[in-house]
Image (cartoon, rainbow, N blue to C red):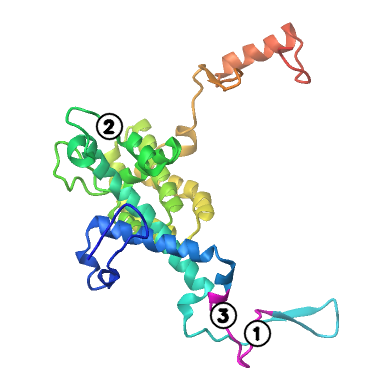
Amino acid sequence: MEYCLINIGDPVDVETLHAVKVEDLSLGHLAYGAAFFASAFAKRLADPASLQEIATFRNAEGRDWSGYSAIKTGDKQNQATTEASEPTAPDNYVDTLPAIFKSVARAERTIDAALTHLVPKVDTAIGDQMSYFGAPEGVQAFRGTKAFLKRSMQHSGYKVGKLIQRAAQVAHTVASDRTSEGAAPKLPDLASSFTAGEVPVENLEHLARLDNDLTKYSRKTGQGTDYKDRVLEVFEPQLVQVARQENPDTLRQVKQSWLETIAYHIDEDGPPPSEVLVKQPDNALHVRKHEDGSATASMHMDPGWAAYLDNFLTHNLNFKGDAPLIP
């Protein structure tokens, strides 16, 4: 039996992919299998002729089902749309577009989950790079987890940062004073659903931001994060249900409502999060330089400095906003 975990397409024993045997596969073999089948799937879809492989529904008469039709009632201004007879699903339903997309969505989510759970393993490897990366003794091949993920995944720093943030929410942590299993995730039900591919990664990120906002709120109101975590545990079943069922746009819209509700249970007499979490002016000048030598400057000023600047621009420079301030 021959294996190669480097080049997709090299010989692999397909018999080991049987459901009964999959538990015996190593992590490397599982990763290889995921990459192998995903590559074959993408290559097949890239062929225009693959459209003929997609199974179609049929109506009661045996013709291809054409969806819904408008039934005219004689008055052109009064047309009713009625549902056609229930179509018959093909025997190979797994080859229909709805089934294919459901499988692809599950695969995408589980790969996101696998990457998330790999992050703590990389944290451990950074401390012993000779054993895990094969680096010469005394040589630091990577400065940290983020550097390794950027190199190995070819991801941007922003994307890697979000991955690391997700890991803090749903993956077992690893620290020098703990066992290799580390500390359990703060929200175990959410972690379990995410790992099973039931929660889209964007929904998880919305809930992670919700937790971060609640942490800031608790600290600023003096309630402590331990109590916040206990309150959040009570709401976890509802949060997981919403994360499973809704799309990210909907979850983003209801996130503020959840924030207000949970914050109320954290501190019934406290101020609303909209007041506590508002970004405070710092009067600091922030300059971002560009490759062409130009720069973008910004400052979040308090009311006093804002009034001073407005008075200076209006009365000293006669600035009306219809021409560049600096010619």
Number of numbered discs visible in the structure rendering: 3
Any part of residue 209 in sight: yes
Q: Quadrant of the C terminus?
A: top right
Residue at left 47%, top 85%?
A: 91
Q: Is residue 244 magenta?
A: no
Q: Earlier in the sequence, mark 2 or mark 3?
A: 3
Q: CA distance from mark 2 to mark 3?
A: 52 Å
Q: Which mark is residue 141?
A: 2
Is 116 on the left or on the right of 180, as rendered?
right
Query: Which mark is first along the chain, 2 or 1?
Result: 1
The answer to which image quadrant residue 150 occupies is top left
Residues at marks 3 and 1, CA–CA distance in whole angstroms: 16 Å
Q: Is residue 235 above or below residue 324?
A: below
> Which SS does the magenta portion mostly show?
loop
Q: Which residue is mark 1?
A: 84
The residue lying toward the viewer, choosing from 146 and 84, is 146
**Disc sitting over residue 56 in the figure:** 3
Observer-side mark, 3 or 1, equals 3
Q: Report the magenta residues as a range.
A: 52-68
Circle 2 — which element?
A: loop
Q: SS class of the residue under badge 3?
A: loop
Q: Residue at x 24, y 29 (%)?
A: 140
- The image shows residue 14, relative to residue 299, as above or below, that is below
Q: Residue at x 45, y 64 (%)?
A: 41
Instruction: Please tell me in which quadrant of the rendered image residue 220 appears.
Output: top left
Residue 227 placement (x, y as % from top left): 28, 42
Where is residue 290? Give x, y as percent: 57, 22
Image position of 270 with respect to 15: above or below = above
Assess whether mark 2 and mark 1 are in contact (beta carbons under 8 angstroms): no
> How far is the residue under mark 1 from the one under mark 2?
63 Å
Give the x, y percent position of residue 64. 63, 84
